[in-house]
Image (cartoon, coloured by chain):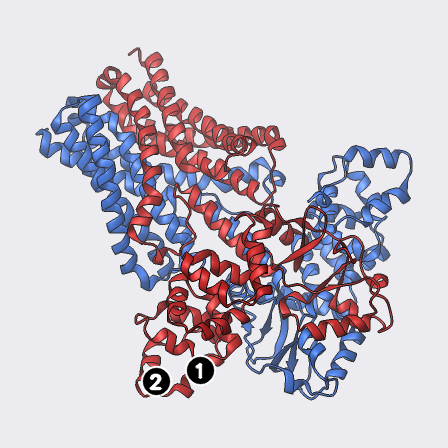
Chain colours: A blue, B red
Amino acid sequence: MDEFKILPHSTIYALIEKKKFSTLKDILVVMQEADIADLFDNLPDKTIVPLLFRLLPKEMAAMTFVEMDADNQSLLIDGFSDNELKQVVDELYVDDAVDIVEEMPANVVGRILKQADPEKRKMINDILKYPDDTAGSIMTTELLDLRPQMTVDDAFKVIRSVGIKKETVNTCYVTDKNKYLVGVTTIFDLIIAEPTQLIEEIMEHNVISVNTLEDREDVANNMAKYNFSSMPVVDAENRLVGIITVDDALDVLQEEVTDDIEIMAAVTPSAKPYLKTSVFEIYKSRIPWLLLLMVSATFTGMIISGFESALASYVVLTSFIPMLMDTGGNSGSQASVTIIRGLSIDEIEFKDIFRILWKEIRVSLLCGATLSVVTFAKLMLFDRVGLTVSVVVCTTLFLTVFIAKVVGCSLPLLAKKIGFDPAVMASPFITTIVDAVSLLVYFSIARVLLNI
Amino acid sequence: MDEFKILPHSTIYALIEKKKFSTLKDILVVMQEADIADLFDNLPDKTIVPLLFRLLPKEMAAMTFVEMDADNQSLLIDGFSDNELKQVVDELYVDDAVDIVEEMPANVVGRILKQADPEKRKMINDILKYPDDTAGSIMTTELLDLRPQMTVDDAFKVIRSVGIKKETVNTCYVTDKNKYLVGVTTIFDLIIAEPTQLIEEIMEHNVISVNTLEDREDVANNMAKYNFSSMPVVDAENRLVGIITVDDALDVLQEEVTDDIEIMAAVTPSAKPYLKTSVFEIYKSRIPWLLLLMVSATFTGMIISGFESALASYVVLTSFIPMLMDTGGNSGSQASVTIIRGLSIDEIEFKDIFRILWKEIRVSLLCGATLSVVTFAKLMLFDRVGLTVSVVVCTTLFLTVFIAKVVGCSLPLLAKKIGFDPAVMASPFITTIVDAVSLLVYFSIARVLLNI
């Protein structure tokens, strides 16, 4: 995919040095907007960004602007004259303009809204009022709606006259005079239809739509499931207010997956790219979880303290603590992470809890037995710790794996049921719980079998 | 999103019982194919699946078939007459047919290929020859290509006559007489153009394409980045051989994310949904990792054994082992998982290693200092373990966090560099390494400060 390569910085500086602006322009024009934005974001010397940006043709400039990071957008807006700002804002899709406005400080937002024409300003404000994680917040309100009584020929006239942007034209929604969503058709159906046919004859009447307040992740998952390239968004009265396009659904899915993975690793999610996040911001996203988990781990320490005298007489027991804790933690997180992912792609629901438990119990018996047998052989043949200690360790191992799998698969399901994010119930929390339980089991068994 | 709801099983059985087949058909026809497939997959009594399937109109039947799981597909194919099989195969998109063929046992594949018409059979065989994770394996070869010398009016005639399926028509690729990819245009550009204009006048000449052997995840990531709704696939001579549509890219991304998450939790990835995977298959995907990690953890145990006499004289040291191990593991996995995710969405590259190290070092100093101060206060005020032991524990804690972050951020980058999957370097492996190192540090410091 050589075409995706980014121009080397040295070439750019050399061309600027030699004032070869038309050459630079020629190069930029054949690049993809996302690559130009990458280039701008990575230039060490930000002062040349406005210079390069002004070389771009109007439409490309707007699309590049959308792809740039917030710092660079601010920098450009600060340097823009009102007229330049207006040119960019005029070219922006409404949903992209909203994304930008959400990232900017208040004074910049004011400038952007002032430069937008009244209709666009109203659209931006309409979208801004929806909460962050809803369908309304990711939809665009620029849409092409046809009427049931139009002919196919009329429809083409409408499409040509409004000059709607390409991304929204493949699927055409049909509304009645009250803006109620009554049908859907595709550009392909229009092309193969007779020019005199009525839209209501060729449209499909059964339209799937989502409400403005629907969860954006659910909407994106459903678009993936049904292979939709766009999804109509309706208000509480079933009036068409916007559409969500598949590229926005894809972005939502990628963001949500990153959030999930970060939560699973006990990090507070952030929308900023890692390399752009300050040390203090990273610290803030990690330290509360480390503190919380450290405090929980002290309970495990207290269990050990409680058995201190027993341990003093059998110090060899101490050396198996890491193996038991780690194996318990790993067994638990295998189960929990599998269930968390299953929940987030809607493969698993809470009602499956008994099937899942039954499955995990059988898996844990198999895993526990294998690990215990291997460990028993090792303890007897290599470590020669004696039969009783070997039995204590292997019984604990078997029970730990069992408990870990049961806890690991049920906690994410319970979290989901009571409305928490199941991703919180990943390795770190499971490990802390399983650690404490497995040590309790360990010392209890040791006490009985070793008479301590 | 009430429209997505699936029909209750009881209703279906009641309708079948009463032989209300036309009512059943009416209900199925207004459902989404993916939902019908879900319904079939979840019916406890599989014998009624063929009965319901036969109620579906031809095109819906094929699309439902594609969405069903492999077990149900097999079941249906086994029951199909050759004629019924041919009807389904005729309606399948080539890329979907390939997906099905890849899942089926050899005798079923033979039957499917026999029923496909010769042209489709050739297309299926062409795609099958590409390795599993390449662009070639996910492309479809049914495409509409225009010629530069056609007029817009000719183009519409071609579109109407070939009756190409909807999903591929939004973007039209232009090839010359040798099938070289020379341009791209959209259906929207065709609609707003004059009927007499030549395609070469309205097309864009600068087409981004991928090679058949390109990694499918890279292709999908790039489609997400550039907001492409389709991507042309060319062979080594730049001849257009297929296209990849955005819905397939979305599926690839979802599959790859699930694989990554499973690997991060030390589970061998599987394409099968959890509830459809047998206990023994789950066991096989988990036990090798548990064994491997258990063996690694015994090294940590050996470190403890080596310091057994020291521990015997200061048993209180044992009670801090879980807290030190867990905090080290958590600190390390925070760093490693963040870097792994950054690598997989191309936000981070190996060349950033020094910037990342420098960032993680500063974060680790902040986190380590916070945790140590809190722990020191707790040890002195509540646990009253004495100044020296407190210093030993807190110094170890500080160094453990430092080491964990450094190891956690560098291992995924090094894995990527030498061509391994960075996801392997997630929590379980990092934990095992950090455990051993932190205990070594712990006992070494204890030895010096406590004179044991």
Q: Which residue is disc 2 drawn over? A: B15
Question: How far apart are labels 1 and 2 at the CA level?
Answer: 11 Å
Q: Residues within 10 Å of mark 1 (few under 14, many from 20)?
A: few
The quadrant of the image that shows the C terminus of chain B is top left
Spot occupied by residue B410 in the image (x, y as percentages of width and height) = 52, 30
Q: Amino acid at mark 2?
A: Leu
Along the horizontal axis of the image, is B37 left or right of A409? right
Seen in the picture, residue B430 relative to B447 is either above or below; the reply is below
Report whether residue A298 is seen: no
Report whether residue B310 is seen: yes
Quarter-of-image position of residue B399: top left
Quarter-of-image position of residue B21: bottom left
Q: Amino acid at mark 1?
A: Ile
Spot occupied by residue A199 in the image (x, y as percentages of width and height) = 67, 84
Spot occupied by residue A258 in the image (x, y as percentages of width and height) = 52, 48
Residue at 32%, 14% in the rendered image: B447
How many circles with numbers are drawn on the protein? 2
| Secondary structure category for the residue under label 1 | helix
| Chain to which the residue tagged by mark 2 belongs | B
Q: Nearer the viewer, residue B155 or A131?
A: B155
Q: Nearer the viewer, residue B395 or A319?
A: A319
Spot occupied by residue B356 in the image (x, y as percentages of width and height) = 58, 32
Mark with earlier residue (1, 2)? 2
| Secondary structure category for the residue under label 2 | helix
Q: Which residue is disc 1 drawn over? A: B27
Q: Nearer the viewer, residue A68 or B65?
A: B65
Residue at 75%, 62% in the rendered image: A113
Asked if the residue at tag 2 contacts the one at tag 1, i.e. Cβ–Cβ closer than 8 Å, the answer is yes
Quarter-of-image position of residue A251: bottom right
